[in-house]
Image (cartoon, rainbow, N blue to C red):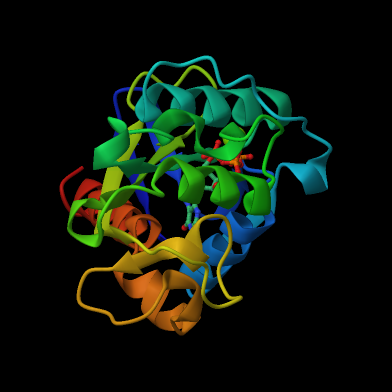
Amino acid sequence: MTSTASTATGPVSTRSRWVIASSNAGKLREFRELLGGDGGVEFVTQGELGVDDAEETGLSFVENALLKARHAARATGLPALGDDSGLCVDALGGAPGLYSARYAGGHGNAAANIDKLLTALAEVPETARRAHFIAVIVLLQHAEDPQPLIAQGVWPGRILSTAHGDGGFGYDPVFRPDGHDCSAAQLDPLVKNRISHRGLALASLKRQLTNLYANP
Ligand SMILES: O=P(O)(O)OP(=O)(O)OP(=O)(O)OC[C@H]1O[C@@H](n2cnc3c(O)ncnc32)[C@H](O)[C@@H]1O
Ligand SMILES: [Mg+2]
């Protein structure tokens, strides 16, 4: 992410500061780990710049990711990365989904959210506890950017019957990713970042940036 390219809205400089439009400490830690090696761009969080949270009024992950990024870009004048993500459980018709952060009422109370989820699934057998995490990450060069880069990642697995581990954040203690015999909260953070919805979405976003610069 160190060169320049042209878009319909003019030259895009990647030697700059970008704001990460999230207030979730767990997400921000993962963003920093995932973006750390990208020379030429300095990342700053919206909280560090005094930007409040956007209203998440969208009806889809992509709409909310755009709302977050646009809000931060408008408030700071910087390019902005927005992430909207969630846990979708098949047996619950996709809930908590878009409302994952506030499933138990308040915002971001992971223990209460997990309690509510385990209660909702109490009678559901192991074979029917399929779920996936989804993350949509968008990059806006500025608040009116008509060509956002949009990337999506999905991480399949199932919901455990009790919580395990203290790594990660959110629903990680009750999510067992396919191919692993432990919860997401028990994974090495490097492994989570390589295979998770957020890791996959950011990898896809980076590929889009690379292609943009290769084919201006
Ligand atoms: O809106 P921002 O400020 O980014 O922070 P948030 O926590 O409200 O973020 P979302 O609106 O995208 O809600 C996503 C919720 O989904 C859950 N979630 C998303 N990614 C997760 C992950 O990698 N591990 C565990 N839970 C995750 C977690 O409960 C998040 O609060
Ligand atoms: Mg949120």
Evaluate whether residue 38 shows in this view: no
List the single residue furthest toward the right.
50
Label count reads: 0
Residue 147 in the image: above or below residue 126: above
Figure quadrant of residue 10: top left
List the single residue furthest toward the front.
123
- Relative placement, left or right, of 78 versus 150 is right
Figure quadrant of residue 53: top right
Residue 164: x and y, percent? 51, 75
Closer-to-camera residue (168/200): 168
- Relative placement, left or right, of 149 versus 183 is left
Q: Residue at x 41, y 73 (%)?
A: 183
Evaluate whether residue 149 shows in this view: yes
Closer-to-camera residue (66/141): 66
Residue 7 in the image: above or below residue 13: above
Closer-to-camera residue (66/181): 181
- Relative placement, left or right, of 54 versus 118 is right
User: Split into 4 quadrants, where in the image is the N terminus?
Assistant: bottom left
- Relative placement, left or right, of 210 versus 191 is left
Residue 154: x and y, percent? 26, 51
Residue 127: x and y, percent? 17, 59
Q: Residue at x 20, y 77 (%)?
A: 179
Residue 214 in the image: above or below residue 35: above
User: Split into 4 quadrants, where in the image is the C terminus?
Assistant: top left
Q: Residue at x 77, y 33 (%)?
A: 51
Residue 28: x and y, percent? 62, 57
Residue 141 in the image: above or below residue 48: above
